[in-house]
Structure formats: C-alpha cells, structure tokens
C-alpha cells in the first residue's frame, strides 16, 4: 500500500496525441492521480489512472437489529420487521411530499424490483433510495450513489438525516450495520488513448454489445459474462463497460476532467453481495481479463490499416485476424502480440496497490460509524447483548 509521505507531488504535462508536433499546450495531470505512465510512441505518453469506486449500491434488511428486538419485545423478528418497514415506507412517502423536508423528493428513476424511488440530496451529492420491493426476496431498502464525488462530511450529514427517520424508536441509520454491497463499479481511466486503441480479451465473455448514442455519437462497448437470451439485445446488466468518458462529459455539457486528452474509462461492475468492511481485501478483479493497446512504435503496416486490423482482432481474436491478412502485406514481418499489442495498460502490479486508497476516498467506514452510533443509542439501556461490528 503506498505511503502518504511518498505521494508524488506536482503535475505531469501530457499532450494529446492527435496534436503532436503542434503548438497545442499540454494538459497538466496531477501525479497523485496516476498509477502508471506509458511511452506509446515518440512524444506520445499515455497514463493509467488510479482506480476509483465509481458507483456503489447497498441493500439494507436490518436483520441483526430485528433479531435482538424480537427477543426483547417477545415478538417474532419477521412480523416486527414487516411492521417497521411499512412504517418507514410511509415516513419516506410523507417526507418526499413535504416542502419542509427539501433533502428528499420522489425520483423519476425507478428500479424494476422496487415500487418507490427517492432522490436524497446532501451537500449537493445525490443518493438514490429504492423502497417497497415487489418481492419479499428483495431487501426492503436499496441505496445507490457515487462515492468518488462524495466528501467525508457529507456522510456525517447523511447519517444525521437517516437518524432523523425514526419509527417505533428505531432510527433508520441503525439498520445500516448489516448492509450488503450488492453493486460495486470499479473504474480505471486511461488518458491519451481512445477506446478504439484498446481491445479486450476476457475468457468468460459470452456476448459483446456495442451501442452508439444517436445524439452524442458516444460509442460504448458492453461485455457480458452470462449468455443473453435475446440475440438482438442484452437481457441482463453488463459486467464490463468501456467508453469515451471525455465525449460523454461533452454530451452532458459538463467540463472535461482532463482537457482535450483522449479519456477512456474501463468500468468493471461487480454484483456479488459483500460486507462494506470486506472491500479493502478485494482481490484483483480483472484477473481473467487482458487489456491490449494497438498504438505502438512499429506497427507491421500503415497505421490506418493497422487500426482496421485491430477492429478485426477485437471480434475474432489475434490469431484468426492475423490469418486473414494478405501475405504481401505482412511479408517478412512477424506478428508479435507482446510487441504489436502490449498488455501494459491495466496490470495488477501497476494499479491494485492503490485500491486501499480508493476505498478510503469512498469513505465507506463513515457508513459503519453511522450505524454503530445509532445502534449504541438504540441499545443504551439494554444489557446482556452485544453486536459484533466486524
């Protein structure tokens, strides 16, 4: 794990490779954001940024609290939970409709498994709450947000807001203790390489779906680990997504993060339920995925033809695509995967030492602190029972 005292200072100037040789100024990228730099060609530097937690979803059931309260109140846990959650759902509806509670409103975004959706805005950060599940197999409450853009003090204010939502003297925040992370998006940004410059080989890929936004022209590649029932379109969420982050921000009329530098985002979406405190120990999740770049010092053919060849590689694989090349085009030249399509852009040894830093920036421990505080209040007059906060 990197030491704070060893953090690189200052910035690194990178010139967009489409403008090499011109007077276009370099873009200054903070060195503290960079995991690795790559010398692609003469004058062409690319950078792999440190990982971030781009999106996080938590589901909350509150089983631990209800198990204790059911024994102390001589009630069964399930009826108690049902009564409590119905009360909380009504409170959320009332709060969303009340002008006196501006933090929460009804949201137009709604998940298929839930009947209600709310937008909670704290310090300018938006949290989505989904409630009233359509099936008892789903958790009563789901929270979704982007930790990468959330400050530590925002979680303190969110904790206070949750604590204010109280039914039968049980604050909603107390139930965060046994929350489970059910979606974790890990983003790795590549600067000065376009999505077309990067191609992916993943052994478990069952389908690749490429979509182009008709308005913005932003192209997104979706990779699926599960077989899709519909041949013409995916029927389940993607596991890996690659897109042009710079153009996406342009389409949203938001300022680019890194000026005119090509900005590709690689986003892995994990959906295995886990405890928030287990995330620092997450093993390298890209283990069976290989990322290669096609911009190299010495392509075996004209760079324009080389780009077309790489498109063929993207869908067929390196060897089958190479077999389709005319002999006169590659005469006397050897197609070397490690030389002509290096795997140096996303590697465990370069990127994953910074994972703990990404977790710290996500402030997940603040959620646990909020839960501990509320449970302590809930149980302050109780004796003979303790909760394990692991």
Image (spheres, rainbow, N blue to C red):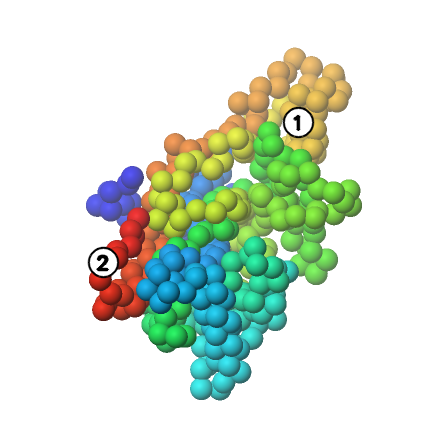
The numbered mark at residue 317 is 1
Q: Please tell me whether residue 48 is drawn above or below residue 386 in the rendered image.
A: above
Q: Residue furthest bottom?
A: 99
Instruction: Tell me whether the residue at label 2 lies in contact with that at label 1, contact meaning CB atoms closer than 8 angstroms.
Output: no
Is residue 183 found left or right of 150 in the rendered image? right
> Rounded to the nearest whole Å, what is the CA distance between mark 2 and mark 1?
63 Å
Q: Residue at x 72, y 58 (%)?
A: 214
Q: Residue at x 43, y 36 (%)?
A: 284
Looking at the picture, tell me which residue is in the foreground, 313 or 167: 167
Residue in the image at 70% along x and 22% along y: 320
Residue identified by numbered label 2: 384
Residue 282, image x and y in percent? 40, 40
The x, y position of residue 285, in whole percent, is 47, 37
- For this orientation, the residue located farthest to the front is 74
- Residue 327: which disc? none
Q: Residue at x 43, y 47 (%)?
A: 274
Instruction: From the viewer's perspective, tell me whether residue 202 is left or right of residue 160.
Output: right
Quarter of the picture holding the N terminus: top left
Q: Which of the 4 quarters of the picture holds residue 159?
A: bottom left
The kind of secondary structure element at disc 1 is loop
Mark sitting earlier along the chain (2/1): 1
- Circle 1 residues within 10 Å: few <14, some 14–19, many ≥20: some
Query: Which percent across, then down, holds residue 120?
Result: 47, 71
């Amino acid at each position: 794990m990197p030491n704070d005292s060893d953090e690189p200072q200052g910035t690194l100037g990178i010139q967009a490779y489409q403008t090499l040789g011109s007077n276009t100024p370099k873009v200054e990228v903070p060195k503290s954001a960079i995991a690795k730099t790559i010398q692609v060609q003469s004058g062409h530097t690319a950078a792999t940024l440190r990982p971030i937690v781009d999106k996080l979803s938590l589901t909350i059931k509150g089983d631990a609290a209800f198990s204790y309260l059911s024994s102390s109140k001589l009630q069964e846990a399930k009826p108690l939970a049902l009564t409590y959650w119905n009360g909380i759902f009504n409170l959320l509806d009332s709060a969303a409709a009340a002008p006196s509670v501006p933090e929460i409103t009804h949201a137009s975004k709604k998940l298929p498994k839930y009947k209600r959706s709310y937008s909670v805005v704290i310090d300018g950060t938006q949290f989505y709450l989904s409630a009233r599940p359509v099936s008892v197999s789903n958790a009563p409450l789901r929270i979704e947000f982007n930790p990468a853009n959330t400050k530590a003090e925002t979680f303190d204010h969110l904790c206070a807001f949750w604590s204010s939502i109280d039914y039968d003297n049980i604050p909603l925040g107390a139930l965060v203790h046994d929350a489970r992370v059910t979606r974790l998006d890990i983003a790795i940004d590549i600067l000065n390489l376009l999505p077309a410059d990067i191609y992916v080989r993943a052994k478990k890929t069952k389908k690749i779906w490429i979509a182009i936004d008709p308005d913005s022209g932003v192209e997104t590649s979706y990779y699926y680990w599960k077989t899709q029932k519909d041949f013409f379109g995916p029927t389940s969420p993607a596991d890996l997504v690659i897109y042009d982050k710079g153009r996406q921000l342009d389409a949203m009329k938001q300022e680019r993060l890194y000026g005119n530098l090509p900005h590709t985002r690689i986003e892995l979406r994990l959906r295995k339920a886990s405890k928030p405190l287990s995330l620092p120990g997450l093993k390298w999740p890209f283990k069976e995925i290989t990322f290669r770049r096609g911009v190299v010092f010495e392509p075996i053919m004209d760079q324009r033809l080389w780009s077309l060849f790489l498109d063929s590689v993207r869908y067929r694989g390196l060897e089958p695509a190479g077999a389709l090349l005319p002999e006169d085009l590659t005469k006397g030249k050897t197609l070397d995967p490690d030389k002509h399509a290096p795997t140096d852009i996303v590697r465990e040894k370069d990127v994953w030492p910074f994972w703990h830093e990404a977790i710290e920036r996500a402030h997940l421990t603040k959620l646990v602190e909020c839960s501990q505080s509320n449970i302590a209040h809930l149980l302050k007059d109780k004796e003979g029972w303790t909760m394990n906060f692991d």
